[in-house]
């Protein structure tokens, strides 16, 4: 699966893998793809440094990238405490009552309240970049809009390509105008924050809108057939996130969550504001139902909702409270039915891709050519 972009980056397959797990990112690159580590969870720069060191030691010089969540709009001088103070008491009560209803135990005294969403604050994302530019990353991706001009310039000075996710052709044009090198067209089916346009419709729209910039198709891709379809739509590669969650190298810390993912069908996700305040596709649970219920207080806007639920989400995960336990994941979860190594996912992808291309060639009367 070679395209102009995969050749430029020196990878065997134009398969880009987003993952929060360093071991998965390294395995993706070792399997011939391009691993991209999600940085949003790293709120202490020392942790990111440690994990990028680990990747450098285990990736054998192969290329990889980093994904940050840098908001397009800059809010000056606002601290996490300021944001906390904006959370209404009624919402805090709703969290307490919901957790009590399901008997979710408290964290132990002094136990870290888990994932703080401060990785979304620009100053945190900037400190992640200071760390990342000390490592041989080849691509910097941004989840929420185009990164600021000085960040794009800094990346380009180091020969690092800049990618940005887009849910519409309008977003994609903004990225092009901001000097972005690669647009990730992410459809409605995708896990995580998504827009409302399906990958099948979005990909060719974005390809046309930003040509000749390379476009990666994301959302709902888990097989070689789907990758072949994306390339047929004009993409220069595919960007996969969900499919790695049930790989052997992934570290979800929760056997119950892995079991839920393996059992889920493609209709078991929902695009909900429950986790972050912005619509994000995730497993549908009684937790997402509670936030999406018009009788409840409803989710707060980003970043308030993320801060509000951070501790609750940690408790649900730690105690594996089945009815509430979820994760961002896309509709492709319906095809994630066994725990496989990253290499096995790649073997299936590349074989499926060849079969799909052969099939189309046969249909077009080109067999044997
Ligand atoms: C668990 C999970 C977390 C994600 N977090 C981020 C993130 O922090 N930054 C980002 O750019 N995309 C994030 N995404 C979206 C992925 O980058 C990717 O676009 C998406 O997973 C592709 O669709 P798929 O889930 O159908 O493969 C996340 C996806 C998942 C499943």
Image (cartoon, helix red, strand yellow):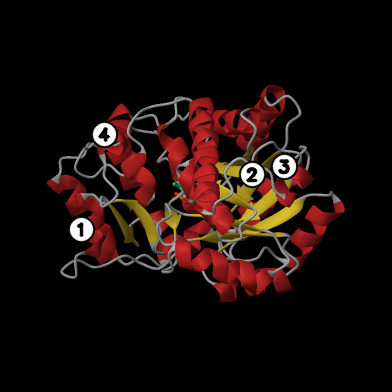
Please identify the quadrant where the N terminus is shown: top right
Can residue 293 be seen in this snapshot? yes
The residue wearing badge 4 is 320
The residue wearing badge 1 is 290
* Residue nearest the viewer, comparing 154 with 203: 203
The residue wearing badge 2 is 14
The residue wearing badge 3 is 131
Measure how far apart labels 3 and 1 are at the Cα level: 39 Å
Looking at the rendered structure, the secondary structure element under dot 3 is helix
Q: Tell which circle, 3 or 2, labels the residue nearer the N-terminal end.
A: 2
Graded by Cα atoms within 10 Å as few (under 14), some (14 to 19) or many (20 or more), the crowding at tag 3 reads some
Nearest to the eye among marks 1 and 2: give it: 2
Q: Residue 52: horizontal and vertical position, in percent?
A: 67, 33
- Mark 3 vs 2: CB contact within 8 A: no
Residue at mark 4: C-beta within 8 A of ligand 1: no
Q: Tell which circle, 1 or 2, labels the residue nearer the N-terminal end.
A: 2
Measure how far apart labels 3 and 2 are at the Cα level: 27 Å
Looking at the rendered structure, the secondary structure element under dot 2 is loop
Q: Tell which circle, 4 or 2, labels the residue nearer the N-terminal end.
A: 2
Graded by Cα atoms within 10 Å as few (under 14), some (14 to 19) or many (20 or more), the crowding at tag 2 reads many
Give the farthest residue toward the left. Answer: 101
């Amino acid at each position: 699966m070679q395209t102009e972009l995969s050749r430029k980056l020196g990878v065997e397959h134009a398969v880009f893998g987003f993952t929060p797990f360093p071991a998965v990112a390294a395995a993706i690159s070792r399997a011939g793809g391009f691993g991209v580590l999600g940085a949003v969870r790293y709120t202490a720069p020392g942790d990111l440094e440690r994990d990028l060191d680990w990747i450098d030691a285990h990736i054998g010089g192969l290329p990889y990238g980093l994904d940050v969540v840098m908001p397009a709009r800059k809010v000056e001088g606002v601290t996490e405490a300021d944001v906390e103070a904006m959370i209404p008491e009624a919402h805090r009560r709703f969290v307490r009552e919901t957790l009590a209803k399901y008997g979710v135990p408290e964290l132990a005294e002094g136990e870290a309240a888990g994932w703080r969403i401060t990785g979304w604050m620009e100053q945190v994302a900037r400190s992640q970049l200071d760390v990342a530019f000390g490592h041989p990353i080849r691509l910097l991706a941004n989840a929420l809009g185009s990164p600021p001009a000085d960040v794009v310039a800094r990346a380009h000075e180091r020969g690092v390509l800049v990618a940005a996710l887009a849910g519409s052709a309008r977003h994609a044009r903004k990225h092009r105008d901001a000097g972005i090198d690669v647009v990730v067209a992410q459809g409605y089916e995708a896990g995580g924050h998504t827009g409302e346009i399906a990958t099948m419709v979005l990909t060719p729209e974005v390809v046309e809108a930003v040509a000749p910039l390379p476009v990666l198709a994301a959302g709902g891709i888990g097989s070689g057939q789907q990758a072949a379809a994306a390339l047929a739509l004009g993409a220069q590669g595919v960007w996969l996130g969900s499919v790695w969650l049930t790989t052997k190298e992934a570290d979800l810390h929760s056997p119950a969550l892995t079991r839920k993912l393996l059992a889920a069908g493609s209709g078991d996700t929902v695009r909900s504001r429950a986790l972050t305040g912005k619509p994000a596709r995730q497993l549908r649970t009684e937790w997402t139902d509670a936030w999406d219920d018009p009788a409840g207080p409803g989710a707060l806007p980003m970043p308030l909702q993320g801060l509000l639920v951070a501790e609750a989400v940690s408790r649900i995960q730690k105690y594996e409270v089945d009815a509430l336990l979820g994760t961002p994941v896309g509709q492709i979860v319906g095809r994630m039915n066994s725990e496989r190594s990253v290499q096995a996912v790649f073997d299936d992808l590349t074989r499926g891709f060849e079969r799909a291309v052969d099939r189309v060639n046969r249909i077009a009367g080109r067999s044997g050519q």
